[in-house]
């Protein structure tokens, strides 16, 4: 969800909430497949993780640091920063690319000779999903989501108070 650039706090918070929601979805998928010893490819389920990349817009990439202009201020106590040709701070417009990737670690070998996927020695290669790790990831994602929601609500209150002036 993209909101007008006058409300960058909303944009950052909504991006953060979106990322945390994707993390929670992946954790749920991992927990649902914790006992999947054979997928469509004939191998055990591989734990998924979210790889996140942030990159600026093309306009900010084309501006060299020495070409950035200083923001005008009316008071010495104002925060100093640099602005691009569009008048926005050079880091004010980020796109987030999150993609699911497989965790490359191998799962445990468990002795279960009666299991249909057991090898000739009676061992089954289990998925590399650990309940404790997934629950820690879920708690971290939940708290990250809540922090972004709190920041979003603070930005909303600031915008509302500004309109009340």
Image (cartoon, grey):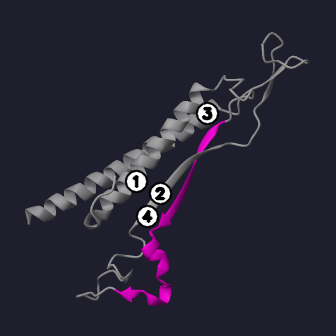
Q: Are marks 2 and 1 in contact (CB under 8 Å)?
A: yes
Left or right: 26 as drawn, with respect to 95 = right
Q: Secondary structure at mark 2?
A: strand
The mark nearer the N terminus, 3 or 1, is 1
Question: Is residue 19 found inside the magenta-colored segment of the image?
Answer: no
**Which labelled disc corresponds to residue 94?**
4
Left or right: 45 as drawn, with respect to 98 = right
Chain part drawn in magenta: 47-70
The mark nearer the N terminus, 3 or 4, is 4
Which residue, as the protein is rendered here, is positioned at the far top?
Answer: 114
Q: Residues within 10 Å of mark 2 (few under 14, many from 20)?
A: some
Residue behind mark 2: 96
CA distance separating discs 3 and 1? 27 Å
**Which labelled disc corresponds to residue 132?**
3
Residue 47 x %, y %: 65, 36
Q: Are marks 4 and 1 in contact (CB under 8 Å)?
A: yes
Residue behind mark 1: 15
């Amino acid at each position: 969800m993209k909101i007008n650039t006058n409300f960058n706090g909303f944009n950052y918070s909504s991006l953060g909430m979106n990322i945390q929601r994707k993390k929670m979805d992946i954790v749920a998928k991992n927990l649902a497949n914790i006992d999947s010893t054979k997928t469509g490819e004939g191998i055990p389920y591989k734990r998924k993780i979210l790889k996140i990349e942030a990159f600026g817009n093309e306009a900010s990439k084309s501006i060299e640091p020495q070409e950035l202009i200083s923001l005008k201020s009316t008071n010495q106590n104002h925060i100093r920063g640099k602005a691009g040709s569009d008048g926005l701070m050079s880091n004010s417009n980020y796109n987030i690319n999150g993609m699911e990737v497989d965790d490359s670690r191998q799962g445990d070998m468990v002795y279960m000779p009666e299991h249909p996927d057991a090898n000739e020695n009676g061992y089954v290669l289990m998925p590399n999903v650990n309940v404790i790790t997934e629950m820690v990831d879920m708690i971290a994602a939940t708290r990250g989501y809540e922090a972004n929601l709190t920041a979003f609500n603070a930005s909303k209150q600031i915008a509302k108070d500004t309109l009340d002036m």
